[in-house]
């Protein structure tokens, strides 16, 4: 986990490793909670975007399985990749629920509920591990983790901007890629024999 002081607040920005994302999702209380957190950490959705996801928003395209975000920040449309396991889970849930495919997947109506789900899982992990970093984790840190992981895997930054809904590369670099992912740091450390 990487932490960095916020410029204008007293708390920290957090970047999770992919292993920590897996641990976080495992600490989520139920399937809806895991899906909500995964949509932030693996698809880069903001909390309000998670509330809008409907099963019909998962589509197979020539670029692969994508999640259509109809009303992102500034009411902008975008498409972002969705991991196959998340897409399959969402489609399976849709097969067994008594709601139209156009209705929201997550059955809460406020971002406060999403933050509470995240806080519960993070507090549990803080207690289990003793790592104070978990106490700083916020929902937007999942989006930050997603963007940084893509950049660390050498995904074209302009494509990351497109998938994430950023207007320009400067905004992305200034606010989201403020730290290298733990995986990228480990990869670079392995190049140094005395570390």
Image (tube, helix red, strand yellow):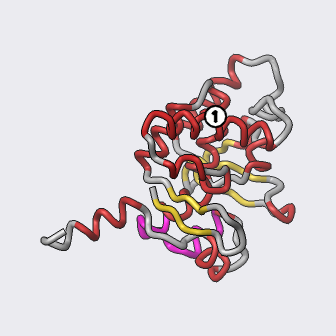
The spot of residue 87 in percent (x, y) is 59, 37
The spot of residue 72 in percent (x, y) is 79, 58
Range of residues picked out in magenta? 150-163
The spot of residue 182 in percent (x, y) is 39, 60
Query: Residue 175 vs residue 116: left or right?
Result: left
State whether residue 105 is above or below residue 75: above
Please tell me which residue lies in front, 85 or 59. Answer: 85
Please tell me which residue lies in front, 20 or 129. Answer: 129
Q: What residue sits 36% from the left and 65% below the top?
A: 184
Q: Is residue 25 visible?
A: yes
Q: What residue sits 64% from the left and 40% below the top?
A: 118
Q: What residue sits 72% from the left and 37% below the top?
A: 116
The spot of residue 185 in percent (x, y) is 34, 66
Please tell me which residue lies in front, 15 or 63. Answer: 15
| Residue density around tag 1, few if under 14, some if 14–19, many if 20 or more, within 10 Å | some
Which corner quadrant of the image does residue 124 belong to?
A: top right
Furthest residue to the bottom?
A: 170
Q: Is residue 135 magenta?
A: no
Query: Residue 47 vs residue 154: left or right?
Result: right
Pointer 1 residue: 120
Please tell me which residue lies in front, 166 or 30. Answer: 30
In what quadrant of the picture does the C terminus appear?
Answer: bottom left
Element class at badge 1: helix
Q: Is residue 61 visible?
A: no
Q: Main secondary structure of the magenta part?
A: helix
């Amino acid at each position: 986990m990487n932490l960095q002081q916020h410029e204008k607040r007293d708390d920290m920005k957090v970047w999770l490793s992919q292993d920590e994302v897996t641990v976080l999702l495992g600490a989520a209380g139920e399937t809806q909670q895991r899906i909500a957190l995964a949509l932030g950490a693996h698809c880069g959705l903001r909390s309000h975007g998670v509330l809008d996801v409907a099963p019909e928003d998962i589509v197979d395209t020539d670029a692969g399985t994508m999640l259509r975000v109809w009303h992102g920040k500034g009411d902008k449309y975008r498409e972002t990749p969705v991991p196959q396991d998340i897409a399959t889970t969402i489609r399976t849930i849709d097969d067994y629920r008594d709601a139209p495919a156009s209705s929201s997947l997550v059955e809460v109506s406020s971002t406060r509920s999403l933050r509470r789900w995240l806080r519960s899982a993070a507090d549990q992990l803080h207690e289990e591990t003793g790592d104070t970093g978990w106490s700083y984790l916020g929902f937007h840190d999942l989006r930050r983790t997603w963007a940084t992981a893509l950049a660390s895997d050498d995904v074209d930054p302009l494509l990351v901007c497109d998938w994430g809904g950023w207007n320009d590369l400067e905004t992305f670099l200034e606010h989201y890629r403020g730290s290298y992912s733990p995986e990228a740091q480990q990869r670079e450390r392995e190049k140094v024999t005395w570390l």
